[in-house]
């Protein structure tokens, strides 16, 4: 597949001995290696949407950072085109890959790798280092501009004003307005991470501000769904321990049974409507990996009512659910009305089938015709009718598809580290971007990831600073647990992986719109993905940029 440019490519001017390279969003600037130039040399984007590019810089020999400071970018753009500038910061990654890996990693040992997109204040420079490449990231938002325009970036030394160079990027804004995501996208949102990092009560006034800011960021990254902690989600918690309580429902035991305060849940639902959340996922009703225990559930005073010590099928806990679930459902009916997904236990396996069946039967009458689904890898749990629809791991999805599962809901996490796409920091960005083509090719109904902002060690034994340890205390490959950083002033800072994941979902939006007009076979032929699979996909970053541009141009006619 080729996309013939219909106008000149970008122009780059290098001044006073500095090196300047225009890069696309799929290049990672690692410092010592000269970066790959932009695969298209231009941006092609729909109106009312976003696109990104990078500028990589290497200072001239003998350049003194103490004297001249960093590199300041002055951006000129036409009216209706907004451009924001970020420094691409490096993070220390003690664990980049597991023993179960393939050859398509950029790094497999401890490394200092680019990931954080740190906002730059007006006049603030990108710190440079001798003999090394550093990058600036530019996000372009087309608010009103249309047609062929340009973004010009002039680079100067922060203290002396000495010119470093300039880059002029052609931007084509097409008269195409895309629909919202055609799939469910769930990236699990962890309220405790916000409260612990910023040192606030989860639902204090400032706690709510943080929640809304980061939930908006989740929607910006492509999420359509939000994990809703009616009680503290029983996820990645060591047996016998507790995570910070973030339950939305106030629970009180009374002489007559149970009383429930839905004030926080109602506020959560109002926020979700305000920020554009389409679907809700309820916190799992039973413990992870088999559902043997109840979640950690506390009353309004903080006293533990149920937890690891509670048999999930015990009379007391099931009696509680008989009062709790109808009360929650009544609140949802009154204040939400949109799609809701319920979970029982995350990632059950074949040995859990008998108990899973009993758990499902125990709550069936309480949930009625609501959708109940869980992430799994074992085909038998679906083929025997225990979990339908299933949320299937990408490295186990093909047998489900071969067995007749249509429009699969897919997920990946730390275990999907070999062959399939993923978004670890040490992976090249095309392995993140290919997901959009795969979701389209498999006609997926949804995608799930467990970590939008999980900032704990594995099993949540302690909170940590993701800027200093993105490997969750050597529990997961760096970046598996989150794609957003807790920035200064309570602001969410995106990562490279955040932006590229959004681009993958934007690919899906474009391909879906074109397929509705021209048919799926026509789109797959245009993209050259007739034989694409979850493990066999192009490793050329330009393939993904060309495919996006070609589909947009075709859609625009």
Image (tube, rainbow, N blue to C red):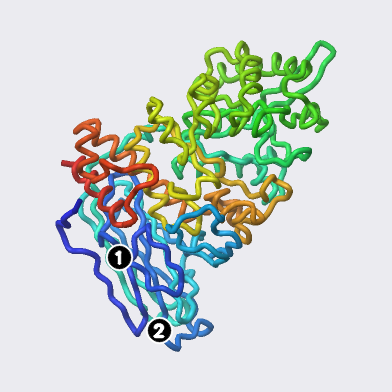
Of residues 136 and 511, which is closer to you in this image?
511
Outermost residue on the right side: it is: 255
Q: In which quarter of the image is residue 230?
A: top right
Vertical placement of 252 versus 511: above or below? above
Which quadrant does the C terminus fall into? top left
Label disc, if present, on residue 132 of the rendered structure: none
Mark 1 and mark 2 lie on one chain; the one further toward the N terminus is 2
Instruction: Give the Cα distance between marks 1 and 2.
Output: 22 Å
Residue 26 falls left or right of residue 328: left
Mark 1 residue crowding within 10 angstroms, few (<14) / some (14–19) / many (20+): some
Of residues 340 and 469, which is closer to you in this image?
469
Residue at the location (73% across, 48% down)? 461
Residue 330 appearing in the image = no
Residue at the location (67% across, 28% down)? 291
Residue at the location (66% across, 26% down)? 285
Question: Which type of secondary structure does the marked residue at label 2 adopt?
Answer: loop
Residue at the location (54% across, 57% down)? 97
| Residue denoted by label 1 | 152
The image position of residue 463, as x and y in percent, is 70, 51
Residue 103 appearing in the image = yes
Question: Which type of secondary structure does the marked residue at label 1 adopt?
Answer: strand
Vertical placement of 34 versus 46: above or below? below
The image position of residue 44, as x and y in percent, is 26, 52
Residue 533 falls left or right of residue 374: left
Of residues 18 and 316, which is closer to you in this image?
316
The image position of residue 504, as x and y in percent, is 38, 46
Mark 2 residue crowding within 10 angstroms, few (<14) / some (14–19) / many (20+): some
Label disc, if present, on residue 60 of the rendered structure: 2
The image position of residue 415, as x and y in percent, is 54, 45
Q: Nearer the viewer, mark 1 or mark 2?
A: 2
Residue 1 falls left or right of residue 335: left
Vertical placement of 302 versus 156: above or below? above
């Amino acid at each position: 597949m080729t996309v013939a440019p219909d106008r000149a490519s970008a122009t780059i001017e290098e001044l006073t001995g500095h090196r300047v390279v225009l890069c696309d969003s799929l290049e990672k600037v690692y410092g010592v290696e000269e970066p790959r130039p932009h695969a298209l040399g231009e941006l092609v984007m729909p109106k009312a949407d976003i696109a990104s590019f990078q500028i990589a810089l290497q200072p001239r020999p003998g350049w003194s950072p103490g004297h001249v400071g960093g590199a300041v970018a002055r951006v000129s753009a036409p009216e209706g085109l907004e451009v924001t500038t970020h420094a691409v910061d490096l993070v220390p990654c003690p664990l980049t890959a597991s023993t179960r890996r393939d050859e398509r990693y950029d790094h497999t040992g401890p490394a200092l790798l680019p990931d954080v997109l740190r906002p730059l204040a007006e006049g603030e420079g990108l710190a440079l280092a001798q003999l090394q490449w550093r990058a600036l990231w530019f996000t372009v938002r087309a608010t009103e501009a249309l047609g062929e325009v340009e973004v010009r970036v002039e680079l100067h030394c922060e203290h002396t004003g000495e010119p470093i160079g300039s880059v002029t990027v052609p931007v084509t804004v097409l008269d195409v307005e895309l629909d919202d995501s055609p799939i469910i996208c769930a990236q699990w949102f962890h309220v405790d991470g916000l409260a612990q990092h910023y040192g606030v009560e989860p639902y204090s006034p400032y706690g709510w501000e943080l929640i809304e800011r980061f939930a908006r960021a989740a929607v910006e990254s492509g999420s359509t769904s939000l994990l809703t902690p009616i009680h503290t989600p029983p996820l990645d918690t060591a047996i016998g321990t507790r995570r910070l309580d973030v339950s939305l429902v106030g629970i009180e035991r009374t002489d007559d049974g149970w009383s429930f305060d839905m004030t926080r849940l109602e506020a959560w639902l109002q926020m979700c409507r305000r920020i554009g959340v389409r679907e809700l996922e309820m916190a799992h009703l039973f413990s992870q990996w088999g559902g043997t225990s109840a979640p950690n559930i506390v009353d309004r005073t903080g006293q533990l009512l149920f937890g690891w010590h509670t048999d999930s099928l015990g009379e007391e806990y099931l009696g509680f659910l008989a009062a709790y679930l109808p009360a929650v459902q009544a609140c949802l009916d009154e204040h939400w009305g949109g799609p809701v997904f319920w979970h029982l236990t995350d990632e059950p396996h074949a040995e859990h089938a008998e108990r899973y069946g009993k758990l499902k039967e125990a709550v069936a009458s309480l949930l009625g015709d609501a959708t109940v689904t869980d992430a799994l890898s074992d085909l038998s749990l679906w083929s025997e009718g225990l979990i339908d629809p299933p949320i299937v791991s990408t490295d186990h999805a093909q047998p489900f598809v071969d067995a007749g599962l249509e429009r699969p809901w897919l997920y990946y996490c730390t275990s999907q580290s070999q062959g399939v796409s993923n978004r670890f920091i040490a992976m090249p960005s095309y392995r993140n971007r290919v997901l959009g083509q795969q979701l389209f090719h498999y006609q997926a109904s949804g995608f799930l990831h467990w970590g939008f902002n999980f900032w704990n060690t594995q099993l949540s034994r302690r909170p940590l600073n993701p800027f200093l340890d993105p490997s969750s205390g050597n529990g997961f490959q760096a970046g598996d647990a989150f794609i957003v950083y807790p920035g200064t002033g309570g602001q969410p800072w995106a990562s490279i992986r955040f932006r590229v994941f959004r681009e993958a979902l934007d690919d899906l939006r474009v391909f879906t719109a074109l397929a509705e007009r021209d048919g799926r076979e026509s789109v797959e032929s245009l993209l050259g993905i007739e034989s694409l699979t979850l493990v066999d996909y192009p490793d050329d970053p330009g393939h993904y940029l060309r495919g996006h541009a070609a589909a947009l141009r075709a859609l625009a006619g």
